[in-house]
Amino acid sequence: MGSFSIWHWLIVLAVVLLLFGRGKIPELMGDVAKGIKNFRKGMSDEEAEAEAAKTVEHKSDEKPEKS
C-alpha cells in the first residue's frame, strides 16, 4: 500500500491524456512557465523600487552643507 508502482502512474498518465488531450498539456505548461516568469519579473521590479527608495531616503536624511 505504500508508494505507487509504475503501472499506477501509467494509468494516471492515460487518464490525464484522455481528459486534456495531447495538445492541451504543452499549452498548460507554457502558461505555467509564463506565470513563473512574470512572478520573477515582478519580484525583481519590487526589489529595484525598494533600492531606489532607500537611496532617495538616505540622501534626504543628509543635511546640506552651507558654504
Image (cartoon, rainbow, N blue to C red):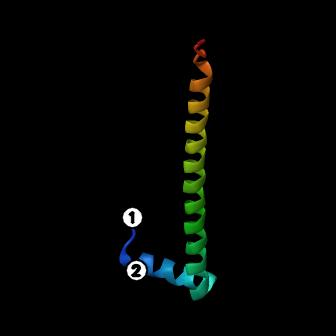
Q: Amino acid at mark 2?
A: Trp
User: For residue 35, what is the image quadrant?
Assistant: bottom right
Give whichever of 4, 48 is nearer the camera.
48
User: Residue at (37%, 73%) from the top-left corner?
Assistant: 5
Q: Is residue 12 above or below residue 42?
A: below
Q: CA distance from mark 2 to mark 1?
A: 14 Å
The mark found on residue 7 in the picture is 2
Image quadrant occupied by the N terminus: bottom left
Q: Amino acid at mark 1?
A: Met
Q: Looking at the image, is mark 2 or mark 1 earlier in the sequence?
A: 1
Q: Is residue 11 above or below residue 40?
A: below
User: Residue at (57%, 18%) from the top-left corner?
Assistant: 62
Residue bearing mark 1: 1
Find the residue positioned furthest to the top. Answer: 66
User: For residue 52, what is the image quadrant?
Assistant: top right
Residue 11 lies, in percent from the top left, at 48, 81
